[in-house]
Image: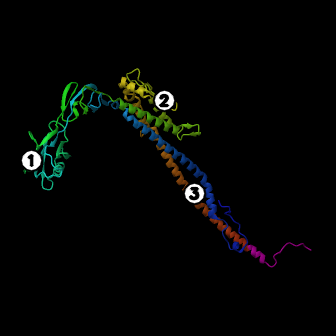
Amino acid sequence: MSSTSPVSIASSTSAGAAGGSVIDVSSLVAQLVAATQAPQEAVITSQTQAVTSEMSSVGQLKSALSTFQSSLATLDTPGAFGSLGATSSNAAAFTAAVDSGATLGSYSVSIGQLAQAQQIVSTTAYSSSSATVGTGTLQLSLGGSSFSVTIGSGNDSLSGIAAAINSASGNPGIQASVVTGTSGAYLVLTSTVTGASNTMSITETAGTGLSALTYGSGSTNYTQQTAAQDAGFSIAGIAYTSPSNTVSNALSGVTLNLLTTTSSPATLTVADNTSTIESNVQTFVKAYNTLQKSLTQLGGYDATTSTAGPLMGNSALTNAQSQIQAALYGVVNTGSATYTSLASVGITANSDGSLSLNMAQLAVALSTHFSAVSALFSGKGGVASSLNTVLNAQLGGSGPIESLSQSLVQQNNALTQQSQQLSQQMSALQASLTQQYSSLNVLLSQLQTTSSYLTQAFASLPNAPKGSSSGG
């Protein structure tokens, strides 16, 4: 506010006599409007800040609950505990994986031979990889598939022929290379497909310049380094052969990856996948501890800093907390007298409300009574399934948290409307006051002009007394 008064008294100078502004209308009106608006505006601003802060806090609450709920997906249904795992007693000999078709069981596995691909090496040693071999057309076959390569004067060297084979259209898996030794360069053909039926044959279908590279029954043009053969193994004493070392049709729901032969039987065990469940429970405990930290920050009280959380005492938060804890620490009918609560499987509460997990205790529970642990989390009334039900109700469209959110939005909109109405009222007040004080200003100006005129008129009268005198 200016230190200069918006109201001035006109002097008897010529400027005053001429009539002028007696009141600084714009300054006076601005001060009056500001004085009227300020307290109302302060209340609206304070309320808006409080509502905005609470809206932000409720948003954080919703996010924290939703994030925690996502950790329940691997524990809240019986299907989450239905996964099986396969282990090998000799992982150097074979590994295994299972799918939904697998069943619990233990099997003896013996591997007599691995599937392998054929490899042949030309018996003719050429002077170098660039040595000329000849021209013509070769037809190469692998198993039941075949393709042709035509060799002309531009690629009739040993390396040219190898490149032509490798780049040929329709090649089912024959790789050609040139290996140079002390006695010369040799053409090496290797199949990329294992199995006894996947043998190679080569015939010359046009020309005679490539006859030294043909191969078939009784041929002496190549030496076989590795024979095409099937894998031979047994499961539970039942013999089986496979063209591949990856076998998925010998044992239902199980895929074996054969790695080497065995001198004594190894054991394949298909059992409940406890390692996955252990990992999922660890994730659940960490997720809950993150949630608990968020809830404490939002609704707790920090005695060290004497600071209350933005939602301290809020019914939506306290209601969610109480229902979550009821589900978390409830006793569940699992069919076991031992494993009926989280504490019984190694999950206990700390003084700050967070959880601790004893992995050894959980492992014992899973290995001795897997079905009870499954029921504890995912069965009817189970911890994870109950928590999921609670969170669905809390976060649903008609739940208390969403209702609070909608209420806060309405409050915020109402405050915005109040602010707009106050601005309109102040504009109207400003206009009204401006009109009133402008009219008053005109009247005062006229009175000042009249006063100045009368003063000058009286002063000009001839017998106007100049001062008081005593009578004689």
Apparent side of residue 120 relative to residue 96 in the rendered image (left or right): left
Q: Is residue 438 above or below residue 108?
A: below
Residue at 18% from the left image edge and 50% from the top image edge: 129
In the rendered structure, are the residues bearing label 1 and label 2 in contact, judged by CB atoms less than 8 Å apart?
Answer: no
The residue closer to the viewer here, 251 or 212, is 212
Residue named by callout 2 = 349
Q: Is residue 458 above or below residue 422?
A: below
The residue closer to the viewer here, 427 or 30, is 30
Q: Which residues are magenta?
A: 454-472
The number of numbered discs placed on residues in the rendered structure image is 3
Of pointers 1 and 2, the one earlier in the residue sequence = 1
Residue at 37% from the left image edge and 35% from the top image edge: 73
Of pointers 2 and 3, the one earlier in the residue sequence = 2
Residue named by callout 1 = 211
Apparent side of residue 258 relative to residue 460 in the rendered image (left or right): left
The stretch drawn in magenta includes residue 467: yes
Q: Amino acid at mark 2?
A: Ala
User: How far is the residue under mark 1 from the one under mark 2?
Assistant: 82 Å
Q: Which mark is residue 426?
A: 3
- Give coordinates of residue 82: x percent, y percent: 32, 30
Q: Quadrant of the N terminus?
A: bottom right
